[in-house]
Every structure is written in structure tokens, then in C-alpha cells.
Image (cartoon, rainbow, N blue to C red):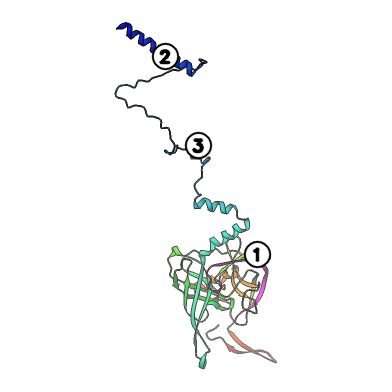
């Protein structure tokens, strides 16, 4: 019995050796079996899963997090904006910076009033539209006198669409200036910055923002065409030191700011020269130094205080001038 078992064992060993030799006749392969015996009570080691046809896909390689060889996620809105800004020209960047800095300071002014005329020369309703600039967080608004002349109602619309009733604080028809006041929350008011118009030069780039034809906060660009122009004013006076520009100005632009490349108000758009009443490349603006000199008087006293002799009319005589009429309540 023992002999039979021994013969079987030897026969099995010889058969296994013969099979290995047939699989590797050169005898170059060395088969080593290493069996790890886990400690008692430990979980069995995880088995590697080999995908089969139609089975689950393999996990991405370790460098997948870097995006190598894989489709990346679309860029965020901020990244897209930064990429777009890199493609802008220096001139475009200045244009955008000026507009984004100042457009919140520009308001739209709508007026209602009465004018003479019509059937039987009766007064008929009239409406007007213009522009203005926020001066401070107390609600003072700068505009042209001719924008609010004869108005009985004035609505001032801010950048966010909120409208407030405008009340006249002061006016100076001679220089075509007026100041309104609105009761708006300070956080809605973005005051504009005044510049120095005495340093302007012909050829300097300028920007105009207004509401032409009711199109709110429209930006146009141009250059200063000339300085120290004169223009007929009211009360037989002449407006002096007027800025001439070629930026497009149309009905509704009056009262809007004229700006330099630093987003400072250097003038207020006030008139155009055009037989058709629309922009022809010749516009005029009241310089900021005139505005800064007159506006404090309008806010404090409601009018511009000027030296006045109190003489309203004279006529010539052989002996000289004779006073014909005095200003009522004058000096």
C-alpha cells in the first residue's frame, strides 16, 4: 500500500516536470509561487478587476486631473471676460473704462409744461427731454437751463430706472445752467468728478454721454475741435470760452457731460450747429471751470450774483447818456 502511494507521488512529480519542460523547452522560464498567508481575522486582499468586452470602462490615468488627453471643462464667465479684455485694443479699453465709470452718474430728464400757440393762441401741453449729471449725494443734478425752461413737471430717471420728481434749485439763463434736486437714497447717487477745463488742448480726445432721442446713456466719442469759441446767449449776452467738439450730439444730449480720458467732467454739452437740427459734427459745450464757478451760487442763492449798476435802459443825448429806466429793486 505504501509502495503504491509512493509510486503515484513520484509519477505525479515527473508528469508536472514534463509538462513544464514542454511549455518551456529552453528551460529559461522560472516559475516561482509566492503565497502570502494573511493573519487570522484579516479581510482578504482586494482582487484586481480585469475589464472584459462590454464591461465597465477603465478608470482614467493618474494625469487625467491635469487635463492631459481629455476634454477640459468650459472656462468660467470671469475667465472668458479676462480673455476678451486681453483682445481689446488700448483705445477700446479707455473707452470702456470711461463709460463704466461715468454712466451711473448720467440721468435722463423728462419735462412737461405749457407753451403758447395752438388754436385761439391758447397754451398747449409741451414735453421735453434732456440729460444731466449727479453732482453730489444730496441729490443735486446739473443740466442746461433750456432743458427745464418753462417746465412745470420734471422727472429725473437714474441709471437703474428709478424716477424721482425734480425740483428747481437755481438757474442762470445767461450761461444756460440749471441745478435740480431729487430726493433719492444716497446709495443710488454716483457723483461725477469735475475736471479743469483750462488745461484742455485742441485734438484732445473727449467723450459725450447723454440721452439723444430718448436713448438713455449713449456714448459718443470725438476730439476737441477748437477752444474759446463764443456763442450767442440770452439777455443779449455772449457765452465765452465755449468748447467746440466733433462728437455726435443730438436732441436729448443737452445737459450731458463731456469727459476726458480720465473720466472727469470737462464740459456740459449744450448746443449743435446744424440746419437739420441733428448732429453735423459741430457741437458746443460749456467748460467745467464756468460750471464750478456758477453752480455754488445756484445751490446757495438760487441765482448767479453779478455786479449790477441797476440801470436797465439808457438813450443818447447831446450831453451824453441819459438813464431811461432802472431795475426794480436794484441798487
In primary-sequence order, the first of circles 1 and 2 is 2
Answer above or below: position of 256 versus 54. below
Tell me which residue sits at (64%, 66%) in the image: 222
Q: Name the quarter where the N terminus is drawn.
A: top left
Instruction: Give the residue pinned by disc 2.
Output: 15
Looking at the rendered image, the disc whose residue lies closer to the viewer, 1 or 3, is 3
Q: Is residue 134 visible?
A: no
In primary-sequence order, the first of circles 3 and 2 is 2
In the current view of this chain or complex, which residue is farthest to the bottom? Answer: 120
Looking at the rendered image, the disc whose residue lies closer to the viewer, 1 or 2, is 2
Number of the label disc, if any, that sits on residue 63 = 3
Q: CA separation, marks 3 and 2?
A: 49 Å
**Dot 3 lies on which element?**
helix
Q: Tell me if label 1 and label 3 are in contact, CB under 8 Å.
A: no
Residue 53: horizontal and vertical position, in percent? 44, 37
Tell me which residue sits at (33%, 6%) in the image: 3
Q: Is residue 141 visible?
A: yes
Q: Tell me if label 3 and label 2 are in contact, CB under 8 Å.
A: no
Q: Quick one: 8 or 166, which is closer to the camera? A: 8
Number of the label disc, if any, that sits on residue 200 = 1
Looking at the rendered image, the disc whose residue lies closer to the viewer, 3 or 2, is 2
Tell me which residue sits at (59%, 74%) in the image: 250
25 inside magenta stretch = no
Q: CA separation, marks 1 and 3?
A: 60 Å
Residue 25: horizontal and vertical position, in percent? 51, 16
Q: Which residues are magenta?
A: 212-235
Badge 1: how crowded within 10 Å, few (<14), some, or many (20+)? some
Badge 2: how crowded within 10 Å, few (<14), some, or many (20+)? few
Answer above or below: position of 199 versus 235. above
Amino acid at each position: 500500500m505504501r509502495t503504491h502511494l509512493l509510486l503515484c507521488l513520484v509519477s505525479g512529480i515527473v508528469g508536472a516536470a514534463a509538462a513544464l519542460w514542454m511549455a518551456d523547452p529552453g528551460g529559461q522560464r522560472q516559475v516561482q509561487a509566492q503565497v502570502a498567508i494573511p493573519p487570522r481575522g484579516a479581510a482578504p486582499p482586494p482582487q484586481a478587476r480585469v475589464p472584459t468586452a462590454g464591461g465597465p470602462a477603465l478608470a482614467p490615468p493618474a494625469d487625467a486631473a491635469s487635463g492631459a488627453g481629455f476634454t477640459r471643462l468650459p472656462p468660467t464667465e470671469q475667465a472668458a471676460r479676462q480673455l476678451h479684455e486681453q483682445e481689446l485694443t488700448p483705445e477700446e479699453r479707455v473707452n470702456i473704462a470711461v463709460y463704466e465709470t461715468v454712466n451711473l452718474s448720467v440721468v435722463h430728464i423728462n419735462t412737461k409744461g405749457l407753451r403758447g400757440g395752438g388754436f385761439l393762441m391758447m397754451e398747449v401741453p409741451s414735453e421735453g427731454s434732456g440729460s444731466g449729471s449727479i453732482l453730489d449725494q444730496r441729490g443735486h443734478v446739473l443740466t442746461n437751463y433750456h432743458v427745464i425752461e418753462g417746465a412745470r413737471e420734471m422727472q429725473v430717471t437714474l441709471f437703474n430706472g428709478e424716477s424721482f420728481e425734480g425740483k428747481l434749485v437755481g438757474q442762470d439763463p445767461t450761461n444756460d445752467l440749471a441745478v435740480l434736486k431729487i430726493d433719492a437714497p444716497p446709495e443710488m447717487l454716483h457723483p461725477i468728478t469735475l475736471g479743469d477745463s483750462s488745461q484742455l488742448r485742441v485734438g484732445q480726445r473727449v467723450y459725450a454721454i447723454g440721452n439723444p432721442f430718448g436713448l438713455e446713456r449713449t456714448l459718443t466719442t470725438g476730439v476737441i475741435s477748437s477752444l474759446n469759441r463764443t456763442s450767442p446767449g440770452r439777455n443779449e449776452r455772449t457765452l465765452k470760452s465755449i468748447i467746440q467738439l466733433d462728437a455726435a450730439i443730438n436732441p436729448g444730449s443737452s445737459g450731458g457731460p463731456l469727459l476726458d480720458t480720465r473720466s472727469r467732467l470737462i464740459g456740459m454739452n449744450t448746443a449743435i450747429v446744424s440746419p437739420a437740427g441733428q448732429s453735423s459734427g459741430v457741437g458746443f459745450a460749456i467748460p467745467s471751470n464756468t460750471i464750478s464757478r456758477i453752480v455754488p451760487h445756484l445751490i446757495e442763492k438760487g441765482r448767479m450774483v453779478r455786479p449790477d449798476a441797476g440801470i436797465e435802459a439808457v438813450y443818447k443825448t447831446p450831453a451824453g447818456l441819459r438813464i431811461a429806466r432802472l431795475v426794480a429793486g436794484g441798487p
